[in-house]
Image: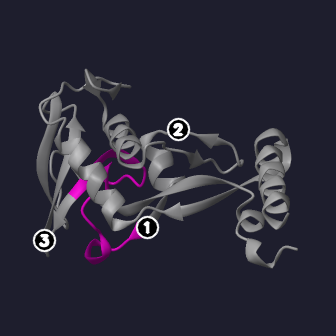
């Protein structure tokens, strides 16, 4: 009889979790090093693909589209929480760096973290890439480059200008997760009567 009650309770909780609208909550978290690495590997697999403004998939990418696509591949599903609370899977270059990334120093950047580029004298990111490595005076990254017309690996100085642009900073992507009844389903069932 005990098994029957537990099975009935679990079935009821599962039904409630899938049919009741208020049963989910959303949290955000920074991506892990292995997730960032998988995103970098996904981006590397697209080296040579054409640059296409607004492109987000095989056949053409822009810089933010490559980052979003690569993280979608690494995570399975990519969700970002906008400042107004809505969950989205798309964002501009500026939004990624401003709202969807934790700022990092160059020494804190992992492979797969985001490097932001701005026009000389500017403070708004106009270009992005995924970090391969950072050394004392430069960063290696993969990006969809309008200058080269395709997805390429590139190297930029950390403290100087290149093509009238400079490294604005580094960031770690922050993603949103939905959880169904996380606390309730983690209760120990052995103590049920």
Residue at 35% x, 58% y is 35
Q: Rounded to the nearest whole Å, what is the CA distance between mark 3 and mark 2?
A: 33 Å
Which of the numbered marks, if any, corresponds to residue 103? 1
Q: Which residue is mark 2?
A: 89
Q: Which residue is nearer to you in this view: 2 or 160?
A: 2
Q: Residues within 10 Å of mark 2 (few under 14, many from 20)?
A: some
Residue 169 seen in the current view = no
Quadrant in the rendering for residue 149: top left
Q: Rounded to the nearest whole Å, what is the CA distance between mark 3 and mark 1?
A: 19 Å
> Does the segment drawn in magenta span residue 164?
no
**Side of 99 where 179 appears, left or right:** right
Q: Which residues are magenta?
A: 103-131
Q: Which residue is mark 3?
A: 137
Q: Which residue is nearer to you in this view: 159 or 21?
A: 21
Residue at 41% x, 55% y is 123
- Above or below residue 96? Residue 62 is above
């Amino acid at each position: 009889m005990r098994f029957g009650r537990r099975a009935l309770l679990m079935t009821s909780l599962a039904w409630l979790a899938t049919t009741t609208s208020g049963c989910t909550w959303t949290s955000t978290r920074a991506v892990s090093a292995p997730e960032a690495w998988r995103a970098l590997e996904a981006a590397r697999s697209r080296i040579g693909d054409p640059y296409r403004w607004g492109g987000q998939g095989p056949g053409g990418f822009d810089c933010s589209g490559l980052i979003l696509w690569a993280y979608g591949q690494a995570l399975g599903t990519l969700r970002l929480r906008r400042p107004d609370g809505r969950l989205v899977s798309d964002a501009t270059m500026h939004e990624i760096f401003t709202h969807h990334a934790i700022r990092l120093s160059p020494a804190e950047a992992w492979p797969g973290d985001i490097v932001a580029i701005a026009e000389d004298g500017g403070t708004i990111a106009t270009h992005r890439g995924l970090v391969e490595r950072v050394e004392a005076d430069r960063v290696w990254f993969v990006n969809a480059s309008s200058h080269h017309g395709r997805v390429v690996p590139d190297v930029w100085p950390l403290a100087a200008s290149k093509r009238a642009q400079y490294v604005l900073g580094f960031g770690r992507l922050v993603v949103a997760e939905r959880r169904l009844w996380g606390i309730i389903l983690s209760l120990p069932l052995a103590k049920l009567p």
